[in-house]
Amino acid sequence: MGRQWSLEESVVVDAAPEVVYRLVANLRDMGRWSPECRGVWVPRPPVRTGSRFVGFNRRGLFVWFTTGRVSVAREGEEFTFDVGAFGLPIARWGYRFAAEGNGTRVTETWQDLRSGRGSRLAEILGTVFAGTNPERRITVNRDGMRTTLDRIARAATAPAS
């Protein structure tokens, strides 16, 4: 079987698309949802299309940072960003929001951008800094996406405090 270059997972959340979108688009909270992300620094909030940010990540003993840029920010519809490291493209992450019944189907997507020039170096950096080679990344991401979506769903339906 060949390498898998993309992945998507989804969940239905008992909240309006705009509510769920606001949770995801607040990049400073990404560390609350993602099991790898520990925090995000956004130098010029609010986040919108074109916004740049730095993500701080950890999995086990492995610690690394990424730089990112928001490519799509359409409230209640889609939020997508690209991440890289040391100037090399790594991945495109996206979230789509679609009304379903009384709630929202949230679909998280991942696309591996480590192809073309510099791809081998990006793969080596991923193995060294994140502890995950390209063959294992799909399994790690699938598990992480399920955790992320579950945490977002719980937060979207939690009583206001």
Image (tube, helix red, strand yellow):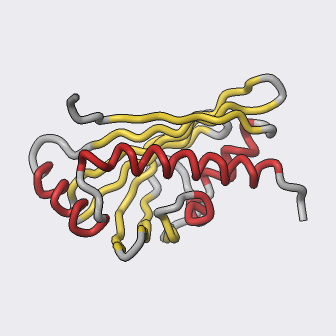
Q: Seen in the image, is 81 located left or right of residue 91?
A: right
Q: Quadrant of the N terminus?
A: top left
Q: Seen in the image, is 54 located left or right of residue 47?
A: left
Number of numbered markers: 0
Picture residue at 14% right of the left edge, 49% below the top: 119
Q: Nearer the viewer, residue 95 or 123?
A: 123
Q: Is 25 above or below relative to 72?
A: below
Picture residue at 54% right of the left edge, 51% below the top: 48
Q: Is 64 above or below relative to 150?
A: below
Picture residue at 41% right of the left edge, 41% below the top: 110
Q: Seen in the image, is 80 located left or right of residue 117?
A: right
Q: Position of residue 156 (x, y in %)?
A: 77, 49
Q: Nearer the viewer, residue 16 or 146?
A: 146
Q: Is 82 above or below relative to 107?
A: below
- As drawn, which residue projects farthest toward the top? 101
- As drawn, which residue projects farthest toward the front? 1
Q: Seen in the image, is 49 located left or right of residue 118?
A: right
Q: Position of residue 97 (x, y in %)?
A: 64, 33
Q: Quadrant of the C terminus?
A: bottom right
Q: Nearer the viewer, residue 7 or 39?
A: 7
Q: Position of residue 103 (x, y in %)?
A: 79, 32
Q: Position of residue 47 (x, y in %)?
A: 56, 56
Picture residue at 21% right of the left edge, 56% below the top: 88
